Amino acid sequence: MKDSFGREIDYLRLSVTDRCNLRCIYCMGEEGVEWKPHGEMLSFEELERLCVLFAALGIQKIKITGGEPLVKKGVVPFIMRVRRIPGITDVTLTTNGVLLEDYLDDLAAAGVSSVNVSLDSLDRLVFQKLSGRDAFDRVSAAIHAAIRKNFRVKINAALLRGLNDEGIEDFALFARDNGVCVRFIELMPLGAASAYEMVSSGEVLQKVSRVIKDLAPTGERQGNGPAVYYTSPGMKGKIGFIGAMSSCFCTTCNRLRLDCLGRLKPCLSSGLSRDLKALVRGGADDAALKEAIRETARLKPEAHIFADRTNAALRGTAMFKIGG
Ligand code: SAM
Ligand code: SF4
């Protein structure tokens, strides 16, 4: 499936819930979380039907996200079923890691070999301040267990100036000494996040270069993401930069996003979406659903509009609602 700019769309980020067991200050926060009733979310059966159609249209890779996907009961058997859909070559997971250790064996059995764990600080107190919960030890234990069990592990750290940017060097050393990829993410101004200042990838690279000598770009594009990767001789892991704000990686964008309410979004930064749940529950046949998916892909804008802080679509949302 191609969009109107000729980009091949083969990747779907699929949100299975808006619930979460953390309260990251730039995402969900402590206040004002309005849960959508479970009945408003697509069921696993409905999601599976859609995944079959996405696969028929050329989607090969699916990232399960949320909210926190592992708080949703039945998510691992769902992943196993999606992994078996003809045409789907890769199903991975983005998680905050709090419940991950308990699920590692089941995930491996479901065919998941790679996990993205969000961890914004290696300092327990800073982690607690940012995430609203004292869960650092659990997340850290899960990361080490995943490494031991040979998962490919990527750690995603969103940086907020003055809050966790002092820990950049610690993350770099962690990537040096462990076989993981640490990816630094520029904060995007969605909802609560717009109250915080992002730290640019260029600045982070400078800081990292102070503790890791001879850092050089690997030139590779790993998985499905927009990250640029660096490593240096003797480093066990890698360092990645997701410069969502300072660089435009949209020319290679290959993704669609389905939120937990069944809205298919052509771009994270845009207010456009197509209500697939209404079609599914209104009795649409497979052909109509496929056409709706194709139409949404055709709506993909050429580039994101994060720089436009007046964009109401950005202010009124948050990553846990869209599926980060
Ligand atoms: N709960 C899971 C987790 O934390 O990995 C999955 C969903 S979470 C919304 C996915 C990712 O989005 C996390 O790495 C989080 O740091 C990131 N995120 C949330 N809000 C963001 C923002 N405004 N800008 C950049 N990244 C953001
Ligand atoms: Fe939850 Fe992930 Fe949002 Fe943090 S970033 S509140 S873990 S959904």
Image (tube, rainbow, N blue to C red):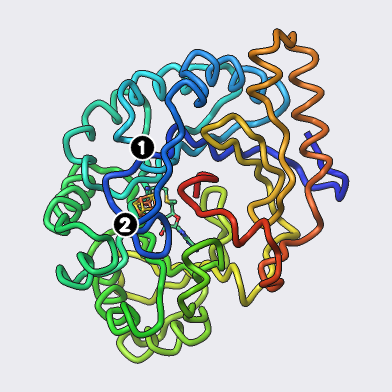
Q: How dense is the environment of label 1, judged by Cα within 10 Å: few (below 14), some, or many (20 and up)?
A: some
- In the shown orientation, is residue 8 left or right of residue 15? right
The one nearer the camera, 139 or 311, is: 311
| Residue displayed at 76% across by 21% down | 290
Q: Position of residue 207 (x, y in %)?
A: 38, 88
Residue carrying label 1:
113
- In the shown orientation, is residue 102 left or right of residue 36? left
Rendered-image quadrant of the N terminus: top right
What amino acid is at disc 1?
A: Ser
- In the shown orientation, is residue 39 left or right of residue 55? left
Q: What element carries label 2?
A: loop
Q: Position of residue 301 (x, y in %)?
A: 80, 53
**Which of pointers 1 and 2 lies earlier in the amino acid sequence?**
2
Relative to 313, is 311 above or below?
A: below
Q: In which quarter of the image is residue 67?
A: top left
Q: Position of residue 84 (x, y in %)?
A: 48, 17
Q: Find the residue positioned furthest to the right.
A: 4
| Residue displayed at 63% across by 60% down | 314
Residue carrying label 2:
30
Q: Is mark 1 on a helix, strand or loop?
A: loop
Q: How dense is the environment of label 2, judged by Cα within 10 Å: few (below 14), some, or many (20 and up)?
A: few
Relative to 144, is 25 above or below?
A: below
Relative to 116, is 121 above or below?
A: below
Q: Are marks 1 and 2 in contact (CB under 8 Å)?
A: no
| Residue displayed at 59% across by 59% down | 226
What amino acid is at disc 2?
A: Glu
